[in-house]
Image (cartoon, helix red, strand yellow):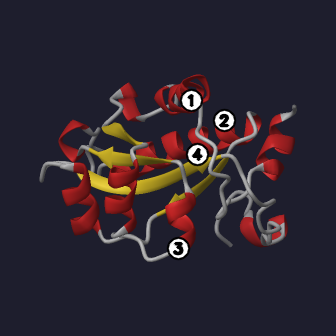
Amino acid sequence: MKFIELAKKRVSIRSYKPDSVSDELLHEVLEAGRLAPTACNLQPFQFVVVREKENLAALAAGYPGDWFKEAPVVIAICTQISKAWKRKYDERTLVDVDAAIAADHMTLAAADIGLGTCWVGAFDPKIIRKALGVPRTVEPLILLTLGHPNETGRPKIRQPIEKLVRYESWK
């Protein structure tokens, strides 16, 4: 499949079949995240895979959507700012960008092998931190649901390219 077709195919899935995700498919998704580019190749993140019912329920307490409880797997992408590259001009880290690229690689890999994902950022970090036992030096940034889709997802509505692209300057 051409990349542009894969990008068009990937949608957020908010309904999952109860089927488990095989270790092989899960590994393929995680491997895509591991291979994602990061600033200076520092990979300042960890992936916490949650599959056990009681642990999934603990995560669901931090996100109010009922659909979230259907996902057979949740991958928590946690950032480690102390391991991130810092831009020398202003000391800004790109840790969130690094994690976002890894998440995007995982969502695309999942779509390519017929799995569904949904990127979740609207969660209570205190509840998620406690549920995962995340230390204070690590931030749970993204929860990525993963499973066999029980829906086709919503159609993509995007701005026309003419509204998003500028050439040579902002003007």
Residue at the spot of label 3: 66
Q: Which residue is outermost to the top?
A: 24
Q: Quadrant of residue 119?
A: bottom right
Q: Earlier in the sequence, mark 1 or mark 2?
A: 1
Q: Earlier in the sequence, mark 4 or mark 2?
A: 4
Residue type pointed to by label 2: Ala
Q: Residue at image x 27%, y 40%? A: 84
Disc nearest the viewer among 4 and 3: 3
In the rendered image, which residue does mark 4 sit on?
A: 104
Classify 13 as above or below 133. Answer: below
Give the residue type at disc 3. Answer: Asp
Discs 2/3, front: 3
Residue at the image point whose x is 83% and y is 68% from the top:
155
Marks 4/2: CA–CA distance: 8 Å
* Three-letter amino acid code at the position of disc 4: Asp
Residue 13 percent coordinates (x, y):
68, 59
Cα–Cα span, label 2 and label 3: 25 Å
Q: Write the residue at 51% across / 75% down.
A: 65
Mark 2 / mark 3, whichever is N-terminal: 3
Mark 3 lies on a secondary structure that is helix
Q: Secondary structure at mark 1?
A: helix
In the displayed structure image, the side of residue 12 where residue 72 appears, left or right: left
In this view of the protein, can residue 17 be seen by the observer?
yes
Which residue lies under the disc numbered 2? 109
Give the number of the disc on residue 94: none
Query: For the residue labelled by badge 4, is the local secondary structure a helix, a strand or a loop?
Result: helix
Tell me whether the residue at label 4 lies in contact with that at label 3, contact meaning CB atoms closer than 8 angstroms: no
Evaluate if marks 1 and 2 touch, with contact meaning CB atoms under 8 Å apart: yes
> Badge 1 is on which residue?
32
Under mark 1, the amino acid is: Ala
Q: How many marks?
A: 4
